[in-house]
Amino acid sequence: MSHLFNASAETMLALHRAPRNDASQVHGGPRTAGVYFPSEANVQKFSGFELFRRAFGGHKSWQPQWRNPEPKAEYDVIIVGAGGHGLAAAYYLAKEHGIANVAVIERGWLGGGNTGRNTTIVRSNYLFDESAALYEHAVKLWEGLSQDLNYNVMYSARGVLMLAHNHHDEISFKRHVHANRLNGVDNEWLNAEQVKEFCPPLNIKSMRYPIIGGALQRRGGTARHDAVAWGYARAADSRGVDIIQNCEVTGIRRNAAGAVEGVETSRGFIRAKKVGVSAAGHTSVVMAMAGLRMPLESYPLQALVSEPVKPAFPTVVMSNTIHAYISQSDKGEMVIGAGTDAYTSYSQRGALHIASHTLDAICELVPQFRRLRMLRNWGGIVDVTPDRSPIIAKTPVPGLYVNCGWGTGGFKATPGSGHVFAHTIAKDAPHAINAPFTLERFRDGFLIDEAAAAAVAH
Amino acid sequence: MLIITCPWCGARPEVEFRYGGEAHIARPADPSALTDQEWADFLYNRTNPKGLHAERWRHIHGCGRYFNALRDTVSDFFVTTYKAGEPRPDVEGSGS
């Protein structure tokens, strides 16, 4: 009996394989012969039907979702850092620019840095035109990402509600609402009663700083952070990108003219004329290998999750004034973001008084959570620019590109950031959306000062 | 929470202090002579090292004075603190 099922599974796999290969020839876009490596993951499309069919084989026929290749001697492009941003850049290089001879080099394991440490919030209600365009580009990609990657990233547009506790908050948020709507970004003002109606667990009155209203972006929400890294990794791998984990970059080799020749790694020298650095908190360390000083400082940023409970919190709530933000994961944990420590550090842990300060605020905001126990508390290292806006740009070193400075809020931008970074690397020129986010803006005085526009002050 | 040794007041908890960023960034002697790039270096570009970091702290809930510290940014261990105006101590390695 089992033999029969296996035989039929193989036949169906063959049938399944044939039309996909045909389709990839028709719709595959520009693809140079010899650089495309179809892997098992490529034919392992996820669907309800596949889940049902493979159940008959006890789910033993699933293949690994990406390869674990040895580094080649040379690539067209090397991305340093296999977090969401780096993997997304590799994916869009292969998908949209026909550059599939790409390696993503990772010191640890993919998605093991800030991609796996953030509070998974997605929103685009930024004040300035440049930021609104960049983050809205990302939200638009989020909306179709699961289909595009054939991977459920669990993007859930449950709304992001920013609370106002005083008159300054109110006029500031109303200004944001108007600025956002002029930029085609949804955002609306709710009064205190509407806030309570939208998120019933909130305590709007009996607290030190009562809630007087809030700004709600309904298209904001959350996504599953690990799935984003895994989905991009699988989709990039299936297009021929090599993801090389446990491989630390130890140097950037340059020729006599100063241009990039490749990277020295813990697994030997790998040649590439273009290197894109997407190393988050370690960007200053990697860029120093090419002799560059960056307008960055790295700080520990903490987050916590509670024990999992039944659905109790319908949206994402943020409060800048009393410094707290909270949402409930699909697993049931309350995901809570704390602040950064005062000092620069690479320790990946923060001080207790920072976390407890946030929990004080959470207990006032949602009194029923006072009885929740916290399950885990961790820190990640975030790279912060002086204007709190990212840098996605060429550098003074030919062939070296950088995507950094996302500070305390890079997760939400993952698809958009990877998309425009891939464009910048492929064309050796920025996309219109990331053109303002240069390194030279600090020299020329064109700062994009979103510091006060961030959801919570860090 | 870190325990920080103020050169004037002694060991105190971190919440008594304000962080002052990277130390030994000298204010330009002749500001009008600087190029835009030199201004960017002075205002924005930072060493941000993974390892020993010379940095400023201010004891705001104590003596109120600025001083400098050498701290390992991997372990957060304070190798030493010293008074403002003194040169960076010649210390090798992390000291932890």
Image (cartoon, coloured by chain):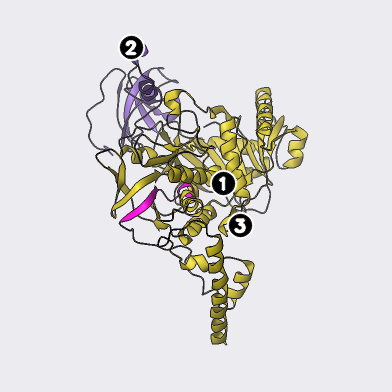
Chain colours: A yellow, B purple
Dot label at residue A120: 1
Three-letter code, disc 3: Gln
Helix, strand, or loop for circle 1?
loop
Dot label at residue B30: 2
Please state the chain letter of the residue tagged with numbered disc 1 in the rendered image: A
> Marks 3 and 2, Cα distance to the nearest angstrom?
58 Å
The stretch drawn in magenta includes residue A81: yes
Three-letter code, disc 2: Asp
Question: Of circles 1 and 2, which is in front?
Answer: 2
Three-letter code, disc 1: Thr
> Marks 1 and 2, Cα distance to the nearest angstrom?
47 Å
Which residues are drawn in magenta?
Answer: A73-86
Q: Is residue A96 visible?
A: yes
Q: Foreground residue, A2 or A23?
A: A23
Position of the N terminus of chain A, as image quadrant, is bottom right
Please state the chain letter of the residue tagged with numbered disc 2 in the rendered image: B
The percent position of residue A320, horizontal first and vertical second, equals 60, 31
Question: Of circles 3 and 1, which is in front?
Answer: 3
The percent position of residue A32, horizontal first and vertical second, equals 43, 58
Q: Is residue A50 above or below residue B72?
A: below
Location of mark 3 (residue): A147
Q: Is residue A372 visible?
A: no
Q: For residue A337, which quarter of the picture?
A: top right
How crowded is the residue under tag 3: few (<14 C-alpha within 10 Å), some, or many (20+)?
A: few
Q: For residue B66, which quarter of the picture?
A: top left
Q: Foreground residue, A310 or A206?
A: A310
> Marks 3 and 1, Cα distance to the nearest angstrom?
19 Å
Task: Work out which residue is located at the far bottom of the displayed protein and give it.
Answer: A1
Helix, strand, or loop for circle 2?
loop
